[in-house]
Amino acid sequence: MKTFILITILLSTIVITAQDVEHEKEAIKKVIQTAYVEGLQNEGDIDKIDSGIHPDFDLLGIGKNNNMWKYSIKDWKAKTVKKVEDGDLPRKGDQVSVVFKNIDITGNAAMAKIDFYIGKKLAYVDYISLYKFEEGWMMVNKIFYKME
């Protein structure tokens, strides 16, 4: 009888933990969809951007001669505001969409791998790092591979 109770408790814990992980993955997907895809890429909505992208976020890349560069969210938002003012956002043509390939969570740290499409064309593979703060998950940096 004690063994049965122990196994029942253990299985219940595993199910609850699995449900928690799935809940966190859904929360991360929502942050990326709202702040990055809708806010930054398709609409130019600063409130949406701020809802899921940390103020210290950096986009990191590799330039000529393998030199690293970074682009702050502050600069990216300024460019986004200009695109809204110029009428380039919200997007009128091909919308950006993403396919979530993998989300890995350890404690309050996570990494999301996504395929980034412009219309039907796969344009980038993004690796987005997130931390969970008191107010929820926030994107903190991104690296990417540009498809040729």
Image: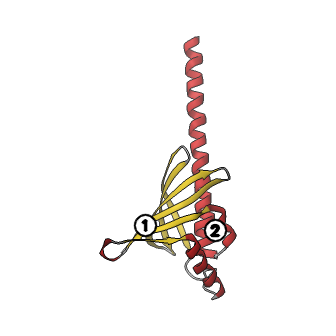
**Quadrant where the C terminus is found in the figure:** bottom left
| Within-10-Å neighbours for mark 1: few <14, some 14–19, many 20+ | some
Which residue does the image show at 68% across and 53% down from the upper left? 135
Find the residue positioned furthest to the left: 65
Q: Is residue 19 above or below residue 136?
A: above
Which residue does the image show at 58% across and 12% down from the upper left? 2
Query: In the drawing, does residue 68 fall left or right of residue 19?
Result: left
Image position, residue 49 (x, y; %): 63, 68
Which residue does the image show at 54% across and 55% down from the upper left? 130
Image disc number at residue 86: none
For mark 2, what is the residue? Answer: 49
Image position, residue 37 (x, y; %): 58, 68
> Which is nearer the eye, 75 or 44?
75
Q: Amino acid at mark 1?
A: Phe
Q: Secondary structure at mark 2?
A: helix
* C-alpha gap between disc 2 and disc 1: 19 Å
Find the residue positioned furthest to the top: 1
The image quarter containing residue 46 is bottom right
Q: Amino acid at mark 2?
A: Ile
> Which is nearer the eye, 138 or 6?
138
Image position, residue 73 (x, y; %): 56, 70
| Within-10-Å neighbours for mark 2: few <14, some 14–19, many 20+ | many
> Which is nearer the eye, 103 or 141?
141
Q: Secondary structure at mark 1?
A: strand
Image disc number at residue 144: 1
